[in-house]
Image (tube, helix red, strand yellow):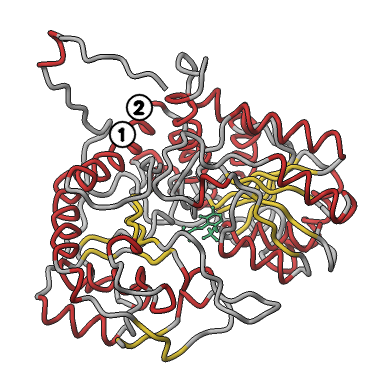
Amino acid sequence: MTTTPAQPQPSAARKKSWAEPFKIKSVELLKTTTEDERRAAIAAAGFNTFLLPSQDVYIDLLTDSGVSAMSDHQWAAMMLGDEAYAGSRNFYEMEATIREVYGYRHVVPTHQGRGAEHLLSRSLIKPGDYVPGNMYFTTTRLHQELAGGTFVDVIIDEAHDPQNTHPFKGNVDLAKLEALRREVGAEKIPYVCIATAVNMAGGQPISLQNLREVRDWCTEHDIMLVHDMTRVAENAWFIKQREEGQQHRSVAEIVRDICDLTDTATMSAKKDALVNIGGFLATNNDRLYDKACGFVVVFEGLHTYGGLAGRDMAALAVGIRESVDDDHIAARVGQVEYLGHLLEDAGVPIVQPIGGHAVFLDARRILPHLTQDHFPAQALAAALYVDSGVRAMERGAVSAGRDPVTGENRLPRLELVRLTIPRRVYTQAHMDVTAESVIAVMEQAESIRGLRFTYEPEMLRFFMGRFEEI
Ligand code: F0G
């Protein structure tokens, strides 16, 4: 790659800041705590940030899920909730919005993303099947396994290297996909599942070009292409920034292109779509729709509410439209990048490039004295909480769990702490405090001790597992 020599740029002298495209109408007061209180709280929580009461948290970067600030339009829509058991007006509005913005024909509402994953996995996977995907997500893979399937990671190798700066680390390696088909046969692959803005890789996008290639491969082999569209707008933003020929297009147009290349989608609307609860399965496949309708009434609720109140669906319809607005998404990803750049400038090892929903700390490099079976990312998240009351989430060996066949710990190459930024919630000053705390913790990294389980749940152990210091 050639680099352009620096040219004198008169306009570069003028710093151009940007600000959020909203102002604050209502605030939620936060409690500050002392370091002694936080030490006691994290010990009581078994060194698991999931087990901290939120009252003891100052800046909550555990997740971007269900923690967005809704707009005045969303709150107003909630007052128009039609709480009918069957055929709520809000369902039809939501369905029409999903058809218009995302383009999928059928919509089955669910209480959140994993509800949709459950319906999808039960409807399509038979025991002995394989489900390729661009890196695993915890609940997605578990639902595939519970249905008798085996997840196969077909993401490009670059995605497993935190320092690699590939612009589309969410891309699928077509050779891996083809190798799987040759090994097991297309009839054992009920669908390919691609996520946009791949969470576990660090919020990394898939390119339109790569998605088209996956589409063609699926069409050639008559295999359904499923889209985990939880963070599709953030992915579209990166395409607009990074993919040739996409700069002049709107996020909404790119989102629609992504959806049009896929047959079916699962959505956790608690992320991109700016609601506190909600999700859906959407599909263009009539048979899948029929099957999912059969399951939704058993596991979620009637097919016109799927575990949601009418007001939840009303807020979701508005949230979907707000989520694909260019100004919104520019500020959203801009804030994540602001935090990432503060850390980069201080020499903190983070996953490159900075992702769409979070900054991921590379715990292996921050705590080189801890081996992975002593859960460095879990220990780092606990230390960060003690330092400042900032709550982050482990995304490493604890999250990866055990291999269902061998029972051994899965040790992923990515051993990360995720600083996940809720949408429209925190200010730049909160990001400054967070960065200062991460830097302070890194400076005393040698004093951080490894952890071992005192209680290890069988499934999704990261949620409720408890640890002690070694
Ligand atoms: N898919 C992706 C990519 C996700 O990030 C999540 C949730 C889900 C599916 C499941 O959706 O939580 O609504 O049931 N991710 C959250 C997180 C929990 O913190 O990353 P859900």
At mark 1, the secondary structure is helix
Task: Return the x and y of residue 53 as percentages of the image width and height.
Answer: 30, 76
Report the residue marked by disc 1: 331
**Numbered label attached to residue 327:** 2
Q: Considering the image in quadrants, where does the N terminus appear?
A: top left
Left or right side of 99 for 50: left
Q: Residue at x 19, y 68 (%)?
A: 389
Q: Considering the image in quadrants, where does the C terminus appear?
A: bottom left
Residue type at mark 1 is: Ala
Task: Return the x and y of residue 171 as percentages of the image width and height.
Answer: 59, 39
Rate crowding at label 1 as few (under 14), some (14 to 19) or many (20 or more) other CA atoms within 10 Å: some
Q: Nearer the viewer, residue 253 or 7?
A: 7
Establish if 319 lies above or below 114.
Answer: above
The furthest residue to the front: 2
Q: Residue at x 17, y 22 (%)?
A: 16
Task: Return the x and y of residue 199 as percentages of the image width and height.
Answer: 49, 51
Q: Are marks 1 and 2 in contact (CB under 8 Å)?
A: yes
Establish if 324 lies above or below 176.
Answer: above
Q: Residue at x 44, y 78 (%)?
A: 373
At mark 2, the secondary structure is helix
Q: Nearer the viewer, residue 192 or 415?
A: 415
